Structure formats: C-alpha cells, structure tokens
Amino acid sequence: MFLKPTYLIAGDVTDINIDELSRSGIKGLILDLDSTLVAPKSAQITQEARDWLDRARQRFQIAIASNNKNEAYLDLVRKDLSITIVGRAKKPSRRAFHRLMEEFGLQASEVAVIGDRPLTDIWGGQRAGMQTILVDTLKTMVEPEWKRSIRKLERIFIRTD
C-alpha cells in the first residue's frame, strides 16, 4: 500500500501557504496536534506556529484530531488555543474526521487534514475522502534517533509521483 498526500510540504505546518490552500477551495482544516502543531506532551505552541494558526483562522474553520488520550493535556491546549479538539481519535479511523466535517458543515472535498504521520493522519484523511497535507515535524523539535528512524520508515509508504 502506498499513500499519496494531496500536498507534500518540505517543512513544517508554518510552511503551508494559506493563500494557495484557500484558492484551491479548502474551507476547513483538521490538524494533528503533537509534532505537527506543538511539541509532544508540551502543550506549548511556538510563536511562529501560533502566528500561522491565527492567519489560518481568518480563512478556514479549524479543529484538531489527536490520538492523544490525556484529557488534562488536551484541555490545556483547548484553553490556550480556543480550539475544538477531538482526543482519542484512533486515527486512521474516519470517525473523528467525519465528526469535525459535520461540525464545520462542509463536504469532505472542502476539508484538508494536516499531519506529520503518513499512517495515521494522511491515511485517515484519505479514508475520510478529504484532501491531505503531509508536513515534517516542527522545526523546533529535537527527537531521539529511534523516533526519527520510525518516521523515515513510515515515509517509505509515501508516493510522490
């Protein structure tokens, strides 16, 4: 099985061109949380990511779908970002994506899923019929070598042609 994201970004979430996405007909964004928007388990967003999110909110309906199960942690992020978060999303399950799409009042073709993991974020978004955007982890993150190796292995499943 190979996955081909709609957009493959050479950089992190802050490198996504908001104007280009808007012109392509996207009206809603569902973001992954850990490693895509904030460093894992930190609940801390960089100023650059916060600025990108603030600009994106001017054009799109935005929510987060996370496999994270720690409700206290998710509540910290909800409060800080004033954003809808579906935790325990069980990605690549379609359930959280469909729930958020319905809350947005949009069709699947009008929603893009943004994440750093091909086998959860991208595959789940594709299964839900949505456009997908694969990004690298946040530039500010430093991961252990074993985790970087797993990420490289996952990227084998990405088709770029």
Image (tube, grey):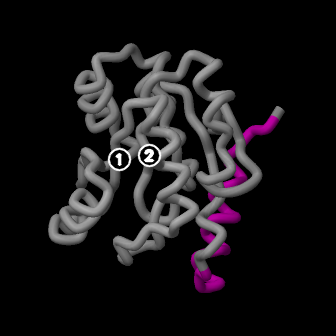
Q: Quadrant of the N terminus?
A: top right
Residue indicated by mark 1? 64
Residue at 53% across / 22% down in the picture? Answer: 26
Residue at 59% across / 52% down in the picture? Answer: 13
Residue at 63% across / 18% down in the picture? Answer: 24
Q: Position of residue 130 (x, y in %)?
A: 48, 25
Q: Is 24 or 94 nearer to us in this picture?
A: 24
Mark 1 Cα-neighbour bin, 10 Å: few <14, some 14–19, many ≥20? many
Circles 2 and 1: CB distance less than 8 Å?
A: yes
Q: Is 149 or 68 nearer to us in this picture?
A: 68
Residue at 51% across / 69% down in the picture? Answer: 46
Residue 93 against residue 80 in the figure, above or below? above
Which residue ends up furthest to the bottom in the rendered image? 144
**Which circle marks residue 157 in the picture?**
none
Q: Position of residue 61 (x, y in %)?
A: 38, 31
Q: Position of residue 160 (x, y in %)?
A: 79, 38
Is residue 155 magenta-colored?
A: yes
Which of the 4 image quadrants contains residue 7?
top right
Residue 56 against residue 21 in the figure, above or below? below
What kind of secondary structure does the magenta stretch mostly adopt?
A: helix
Give the magenta-colored segment's residue range.
142-160
Looking at the image, residue 138 sits to the left or right of residue 121; the answer is right
Q: Amino acid at mark 1?
A: Ile
Q: Is 48 or 40 nearer to us in this picture?
A: 48
Q: Amino acid at mark 2?
A: Leu
CA gap, disc 2 and disc 1: 5 Å
Element carrying mark 1: strand
Residue 23 against residue 137 in the figure, above or below? above
**Which circle marks residue 31 in the picture?**
2
